[in-house]
Image (cartoon, grey):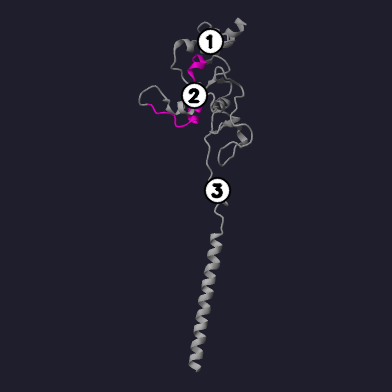
Amino acid sequence: MEVSASASKRRNNIGIKNLLLILLFFHFSSTITAIRKDVGFQIIHPCKTTVQGRYLLSDDNGCVRNATSVNSRSRCCPQRGEKVSCHGCNLLSQCCNSYEYCVSCCFNPALISKEQVVKMKVAKPATARTYSSVFDYCAGRCCHSSESVVHENAYISDFHHCFSLPSSSSAGKNSTLTEARLSGINVVVGRQGESCNSVCKSRG
């Protein structure tokens, strides 16, 4: 009898230990599955930004902000405020007096079509690649445009950051657009060796 009682006690002790192990396992496994996965490990999607300006930046969402207000981790502009801004832009000529606002205004779907931009070649040769995004087109097109230059480094006007699509249309439409761009602009040509300032002062 004593042997069977001690064997029964051992079985009970083993059963209790197994039960405690099972409870301990479930206790920790429930704690582990309850951990939030989004705390501290948020994926940050970085923005592409313009790097030309000293004070302003434009991101690939079309936002223009002061360079100090841009998120240092994501390089994105804060989400408040208007996204696409054409401040300082002539919508007829599609030219702006600020590079960053030119890039932002270029994001306006009423002015530039994404479908047209991503099919457009970056350069003339047949081997040239196409633009990968609207931002790449806008950043490149606003930076340099031969249509806004009169001679070497002399611009037609302060509105020399242009984002219009290169025209492959008829000459009649092209000349009308050029006339609209040049309305109110006086082009003065000086003699060889004469400085721009002296020519402008002499002509009034």
Comparing 175 with 124, the one in front is 175
Q: CA distance from mark 3 to mark 2?
A: 34 Å
Q: Quadrant of the C terminus?
A: top right
Residue 128 x %, y %: 38, 26
Q: CA distance from mark 1 to mark 3?
A: 52 Å
Number of marks in the image? 3
Circle 3 residue: 42
Label whose residue precedes the other's in the sequence (3 or 2): 3
Residue 5 x %, y %: 51, 90
Q: Residue at horizontal 47%, vertical 31%?
A: 133
Within-10-Å neighbours for mark 1: few <14, some 14–19, many 20+: few
Residue 123 x %, y %: 41, 23
Comparing 37 with 125, the one in front is 37
The quadrant holding residue 66 is: top right
Residue 41 x %, y %: 54, 50
Within-10-Å neighbours for mark 2: few <14, some 14–19, many 20+: many
- Asked whether disc 1 touches disc 2, contact meaning CB atoms under 8 Å apart, the reply is no
Q: Which mark is residue 102?
A: none
Circle 2 residue: 141
Give, as a single range, the part of the protein colored magenta.
Answer: 128-152
Q: Residue at horizontal 59%, vertical 11%?
A: 197
Residue 47 sits above or below residue 105 on the image: below
Q: Residue at horizontal 41%, vertical 28%?
A: 130
User: Label 1's element?
Assistant: helix
Name the amino acid, label 1.
Glu
Q: CA distance from mark 1 to mark 2?
A: 21 Å
Circle 1 residue: 179
